[in-house]
Amino acid sequence: MKVEFYLLDASYEVMSKNPIVLLWSINSKGEPILIKDYSFRPYFYVMPDDGVNINDLVSRIKRLSKATSPIINVEVVDKKYFGKPVKVVKVMTVIPEYVRTYREEVKHLRGVKEVLEADIRFAMRYLIDKDLSPCAWYEVEAEEEYPNPKYRVTKVYRVTGGCRRLDRALPPKLKVLAFDIEVYNPKGAPRPEKDPVIIVSAMNSEGEIRQFIAEDSFDKPDKHMLEEFVNYITEYDPDIIVGYNSNGFDWPYLLQRSNYLGVKLDVGRVKGGIPRTSVYGHISVPGRLNVDLYNFAEEIPEVKIKSLEEVADYLGVMKKSERTNIPWYEIYLYWDDKKRRDKLLKYAKDDVASTMGLAEKFLPFAIQLASLTGLPLDQVGAASVGFRLEWYLMREAFKYGELVPNRVERPYEPYKGAIVLEPIKGVHENIAVLDFSSMYPNLMIKYNVGPDTYIEGDCSVENCHTIPGLGYKFRRHPPGFYKNVLEALLRLRKKIREEMKKIPKDSPEYRVLDERQKALKVLANASYGYMGWVGARWYFREGAEAVTALGRETIKRAIGIAKSLGLKVIYGDTDSLFVSYDEKIINEFIKKVMDELGLEIKVDKVYVRVFFTEAKKRYVGLTTDGSIDIVGFEAVRGDWTELAKEVQENVAKIILKEGKVEKAIDYVKKIIGELRKGAVSIEKLIIWKTITRRLSEYEVDAPHVMAARRLIEVGGKVDVGDKIGYVVTKGQGKISARAYPYMMVRPQDIDVEYYVKHQIIPAALRILSYFGVSEKQLEGIGKASKTLLDFFGGKK
DNA sequence: GCGGCGCTACTACCT
DNA sequence: ACAGGTAGTAGCGCCGCG
């Protein structure tokens, strides 16, 4: 019979010494089903040394076979390695774990150059070979098996025939369960062997919220509640479980705590299977997709502090003003005081509702990324950009008959990057910002850059591109791996964008396609960085170096064209140019760039006014719709106080919109006055900085490091990657000696003068000093400054 | 013993 | 744990100083 299914995840089990691939899926009715494939066997490739008798090697490999997992097939196959045809030996065994064993033995055989594709996990191997992607629809020839109570699914099938992809864009209705735990934490960081889980909140796709609450007993107060929660999960039977930082906190805590309590966290679709740590540091729940939404929040650069409430606020899921908030270090107080428990429950409810809200925002994109890269939904978020692209490349390599290179440790080799122009400082009016569209991917395509197209030695102009300044040569034909892959990605994206034009913008299909084209763009844009990443399987420094060299050449020639047309170039960075805006000339410029350089350049935006200091990568622009763009300055940095950022933004607005320097000065003075009066709340004075290594590894006692140490002294926990919020207190000497975690400081102990001198004044002067304003003027001792009119290029 | 200077460490940004 | 280019703050060692 034919079975239609939407693939969620793949895993495998070994039954009586045979591997069975398990395809966890949803059928057309939305029911969970399991499709088993008994026929697939693990394998890897062996690359022989040059001149080795391959048949002799084959027989020597055969002799390694062991009874527990025999080598069932050894054959010579034709593949390609970096584009060159090669004969390799394909070694097949039975039990997936034995790939490792045989790999090690084969590696040491005489005449073996390399062992390849032995590090691809079995379930993923299956998906690649069968061209199956998670989060896509298929139809397979299969037979129904007797129901097995071991699996919590409606039906179990056994694959009997082929599988084909269905052209169905929309996913089935997936059951999502959001959850969030609150833990008793009187000593700061909670300890699983001592501190109980006090509340578990769960919300399902139907919008129902359930809260599980600990008992008020001294002995294992959370045991019963955790059992109830486990029951609830299996009863609701979600396809996807989402949390916020659940891989980093909730799951590890639940696992340790349940271990201590003797509660079995039997929440998967395989009876008795418990969550366990898996690849990319994510936690895998058998048969379900455990997605940590924090991974996706990390990819929003606009949000600097990635707490659930900040991210939910930014995405419009739940406004900060509408939610109950309790600082984490006070949670236990709300639990201890029974009159305040209601508030704690409300807080927990808001958290889980926000989490579900984030799921609605992030999952559509995550689903597209999963179906594109072939990584299961629960891994795709946890995998870094480099790994996502790499999985995509591995799938493509299989289709081209290309062997996947091994990951090898290499030394870091720096190379030259892009050009950044010296800006012309001051205020400029009517400026267009032009960008090359996907400059690096297009250069890679145009010059056929890649490890397999690189030519050492002589090559004629008709046959090769030569990279300016480097002399590296890349053959023109045939296209290499990167070119093939990138063209396919860009072509597909173009096709999707065309399809989108045909359907209504508010339809679910439109949204799916939009998320898909975004995912395609992410992959294409990562290709250059990936090629220059020493950890990449397809690392190729000369290629990455060639791309940046071509980029520099391209932008230089574009500047030349702009100048020849009489456009004034104000600034430029990598693939962008800021030029005087004259529609006619700009159109001519765009055309000429296309004709002469063969690359597309487009007007990204037009600034009515834009202001530069002498610094690169920093400017403020007033757009045609009246909004202010701040780029690079303190106002957009997460490690400056809210107060300083606000001051700088307002100064920028006053200057660019109204041109009133005096007004800006008065405004800054007013804020300084308020600060000195104590009228500024402590939240606006917190400096947030990331801890990027273990505290013992720091060479200098920077303020945020000292603050982190002080947090640990009082029982707090600091992990690599955490942001520490500190304030500077009164006293003498180094700032680090006076930097304390904000929750440890009373408002009257804040060193207000530090904030005047090191936050407000520098942030304001960054812009105002160009207009002749001095620190003294902001401090109060007034002196006339120039008016903005003096600075508008020659106008009167 | 201490202020000034230059260098280094560190973080976060831009494309 | 995709790249290099850049700005900026604070710490720290060193120098000179009767």
Image: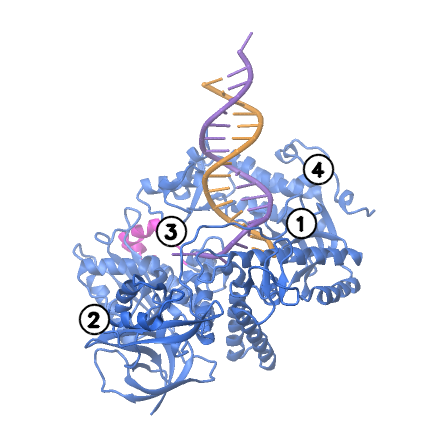
Chain colours: A blue, B orange, C purple
Residue at which label 3 appears: A327
User: Quick one: label 1 or label 4, which is nearer the N terminus?
Assistant: 1
Q: Chain of mark 3?
A: A
Q: Are marks 2 and 3 on the same chain?
A: yes
According to the image, label 4 marks what residue? A772
Direction bottom: furthest residue: A1
The picture places residue A475, in percent across and down from the top left corner, at 59, 66
Q: Quadrant of the N terminus of chain A?
A: bottom left
User: Which label sits on residue A66?
Assistant: 2
Q: Nearer the viewer, mark 1 or mark 3?
A: 1
Q: Which residues are magenta?
A: A324-343
Dot 4: element: loop
Give me the chain letter of mark 2. A
Mark 2 vs mark 1: in front: 2
Write the residue at 17% across / 62% down.
Answer: A262
CB contact under 8 Å: marks 2 and 3:
no
Q: Earlier in the sequence, mark 2 or mark 4?
A: 2
- The percent coordinates of residue A449 (x first, y second) are 57, 64
Which is more N-terminal, label 3 or label 2? Answer: 2
Q: Secondary structure at mark 1?
A: loop
> Which structural element holds mark 2?
loop
Label 1 or label 4, whichever lies nearer to me, is 1
Asked if labels 1 and 4 share a chain, the reply is: yes
Proximity of marks 2 and 1: CB atoms separated by less than 8 Å: no
Mark 3 is surrounded, within 10 Å at the Cα level, by few (under 14), some (14 to 19) or many (20 or more) other residues, namely: few
- Assess whether mark 4 and mark 3 are in contact (beta carbons under 8 angstroms): no
* Residue A421: image tag: 1
Across and down, in percent, residue A790 comes to: 78, 42
The amino acid pointed to by label 1 is Leu
